[in-house]
Amino acid sequence: MKKLISFFSLVLFLMGCQKNEVVSEFTGNETKYALVQASNYSINGTVTLKERKDGSTTVSVELEGTQGEAKFPVHLHLGDVSTPKADIAAILNPVAAAQGKSETVLTKLADESSVNYQQLISLNACIKIHLSDTGAERDIVLAGGNIGKSATSASSTGRVGFAECKSE
């Protein structure tokens, strides 16, 4: 009986010594872009694109200056922030004002075409956070910023004006 108890004690001891590995769902590739104030609302922040091992991308938006219970629509638009009536490439999860955060796992664009991390960071696009998704307030952009090719093009040096969006 003592041998049996000693054996189980040894097994429990060895199990306790094993390392608990945390397996990440991310590859380690990520790109961060600034989101600047785009209207009279003092809101800015960042958008981070993180490559996932399954080929998708986690798009995380973090804003400063939000509060309350509102949910602010987040759009990925084609073109840079100054492109008038830019088409929506993807509708992302809204920012919860109380936390100032949104997270979306993106695998497809609005036209149903697949998109991965490398394609997103090469896309000529921008992110815009809107005050509302309906009415006149849908045209008010709280914050936004260029991503991909738009962020590295010559037109993104200095402050660029924000164009009205195509929000339908």
Image (cartoon, rainbow, N blue to C red):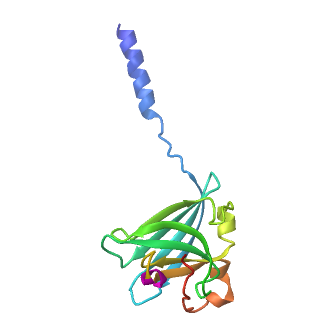
Residue 54: x percent and y percent? Answer: 63, 51
- Magenta residues, as a range? 136-140
In front here: 48 or 1? 48
Query: Magenta residues: mostly which secondary structure?
Result: helix
> Residue at the location (65% across, 55% down)?
55
Vertical position of residue 23 compared to residue 43: above or below: above
In front here: 98 or 110? 110
> Residue at the location (54% across, 73% down)?
75
Vertical position of residue 33 compared to residue 25: above or below: below
Q: As drawn, which residue projects farthest toward the top?
A: 1
- Using the rendered view, name the quadrant where residue 15 is placed: top left
Residue 1: x percent and y percent? Answer: 35, 7
- Using the rendered view, name the quadrant where residue 39 is placed: bottom left
Position of 101 with respect to 161 (left or right) is: left
Position of 120 with respect to 70 (left or right) is: right
Q: Which quadrant would the C terminus be assigned to in this image?
A: bottom right
In front here: 72 or 124? 72
Position of 139 with respect to 52 (left or right) is: left
Residue 28: x percent and y percent? Answer: 59, 59
> Residue at the location (46% across, 72% down)?
73
* Residue 166 forms part of the magenta stretch: no
Residue 45: x percent and y percent? Answer: 45, 77
Q: As drawn, which residue projects farthest toward the left?
A: 68
